[in-house]
């Protein structure tokens, strides 16, 4: 099947919505909710994987609870062609502590997320990169993530409801939890393989399914595992991935909280983030067009003119990597 001519219908949208709510639901469980047989659900999921609509099923872990911090590096490049751009992207893919690697248009040409134990580890990553590519770096900036929300993609439900709540969120101030090596191995597998069966995980770790099941439930209860979701290709959904980089003025906590809550409630906002660095807030959208993105940002600027200084944008053009856990194992399994 061509990856370019698969068209989603209403039943596909409903299946995607259920996978976004909890991608570990069985085909039978999803089928009961969308009124399809488990065989039809599996067939449709397989088609969406084959067509590239679904990239993978991933697990959201609260790495903050494990003493892991998130920093991002933003690069404006110079004197590069497509081959050099891909080389830089491949370099970051191969780094064990990178989480997110994308190229984009706007002020920044590349954004790289790091999951590290401390800022010194992040600094080493930057210095190693500069030693290798300094002649191609025109400008760089860094941020530290303080608060990150993972929204349920309500637009998948095709519902008219405007009520919206975050699926999960985590912050750098979350209390710490202890895990052992087996827990960590389970998280590394689940990061990119959220629908892998307990039995298969147990086989890979040479333990019993009961042990894996117990440990997963324990990590879910403690908030180390936050959610099981589906990663989609926005382009295949008819959307673009736009990131707003927002500069705020000094203000009261109440005003900033109001701003954050308002932005987080916007339809198609998927990853609102409070950050510390050159700017203060980032708002990621999977949205139907750049024009609609501009309209929304104008509305935000107008509503919060007292605390919002300005914003910049980045439109993600290529995603090289997205791993929500350090040193995660690659995609091993599909539905």
Image (cartoon, rainbow, N blue to C red):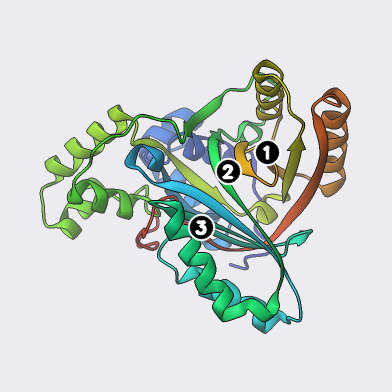
Q: Earlier in the sequence, mark 3 or mark 2?
A: 2
From the viewer's perspective, tell me whether residue 17 is left or right of residue 187. right
- Residue at image x 62%, y 62%? 102
Query: In the rendered structure, are the residues bearing label 3 and label 2 in contact, judged by CB atoms less than 8 Å apart?
Result: no
Query: In the rendered structure, are the residues bearing label 1 and label 2 in contact, judged by CB atoms less than 8 Å apart?
Result: no
Q: Element at badge 1?
A: loop
* Residue with the mark numbered 1: 280
1 or 3: mark nearer the eye: 1
* Residue with the mark numbered 3: 49
Query: Mark 2 Cα within 10 Å, few/some/many (few <14, many 20+)?
Result: some
Q: Element at badge 3?
A: helix
Residue 81, image quadrant: bottom right
> Is 58 rendered above or below residue 268?
below
Judge by depth and name the residue closer to the eye, 22 or 330. 330
* Residue with the mark numbered 2: 12
The percent coordinates of residue 61 (x first, y second) are 39, 42
The percent coordinates of residue 14 (x first, y second) are 56, 36
Q: Is residue 104 visible?
A: yes
Judge by depth and name the residue closer to the eye, 53 or 8. 53
Tag of residue 260: none
C-alpha distance separating marks 3 and 2: 12 Å
From the viewer's perspective, tell me whether residue 135 is left or right of residue 180. right
Q: Is residue 98 visible?
A: no
> Is 139 rendered above or below residue 252?
below
- Residue at image x 58%, y 74%? 130
1 or 2: mark nearer the eye: 1
Judge by depth and name the residue closer to the eye, 308 or 34. 308
C-alpha distance separating marks 1 and 2: 37 Å
């Amino acid at each position: 099947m061509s990856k370019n001519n698969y068209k989603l219908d209403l039943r596909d949208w409903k299946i995607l919505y259920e996978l976004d709510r909890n991608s570990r639901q069985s085909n039978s469980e999803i089928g009961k909710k969308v009124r399809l047989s488990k065989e039809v659900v599996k067939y449709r999921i397989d088609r969406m994987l084959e067509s590239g609509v679904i990239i993978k099923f991933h697990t959201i872990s609260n790495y903050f609870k494990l003493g892991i911090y998130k920093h991002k590096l933003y690069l404006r490049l110079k004197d590069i062609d497509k081959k050099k751009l891909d080389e830089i992207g491949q370099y970051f893919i191969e780094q064990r502590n990178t989480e997110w690697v994308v190229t984009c248009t706007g002020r920044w040409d590349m954004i790289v997320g790091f999951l590290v134990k401390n800022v010194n580890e992040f600094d080493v990553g930057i210095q190693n990169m500069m030693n290798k590519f300094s002649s191609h770096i025109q400008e760089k900036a860094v941020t530290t993530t303080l608060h990150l929300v993972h929204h349920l993609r309500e637009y998948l439900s095709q519902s008219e409801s405007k009520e919206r709540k975050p699926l999960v969120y985590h912050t750098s101030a979350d209390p710490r939890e202890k895990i052992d090596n087996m827990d960590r191995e389970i998280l590394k597998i689940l990061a990119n393989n959220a629908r892998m069966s307990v039995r298969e995980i147990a086989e890979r770790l040479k333990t019993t399914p009961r042990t894996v099941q117990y440990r997963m439930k324990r990590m879910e209860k403690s908030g180390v595992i936050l959610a099981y979701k589906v990663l989609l290709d926005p382009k295949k959904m008819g959307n673009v991935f736009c990131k707003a980089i927002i500069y705020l003025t000094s203000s009261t906590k109440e005003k900033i909280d109001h701003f954050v809550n308002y932005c987080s409630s916007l339809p198609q906002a998927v990853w609102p983030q409070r950050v510390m660095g050159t700017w203060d807030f980032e708002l990621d959208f999977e949205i139907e067009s750049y024009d609609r993105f501009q309209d929304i940002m104008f509305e935000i600027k107008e509503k919060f003119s007292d605390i919002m200084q300005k914003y910049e944008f980045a439109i993600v053009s290529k995603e090289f990597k997205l791993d929500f856990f350090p040193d995660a194992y690659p995609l091993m399994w599909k539905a």
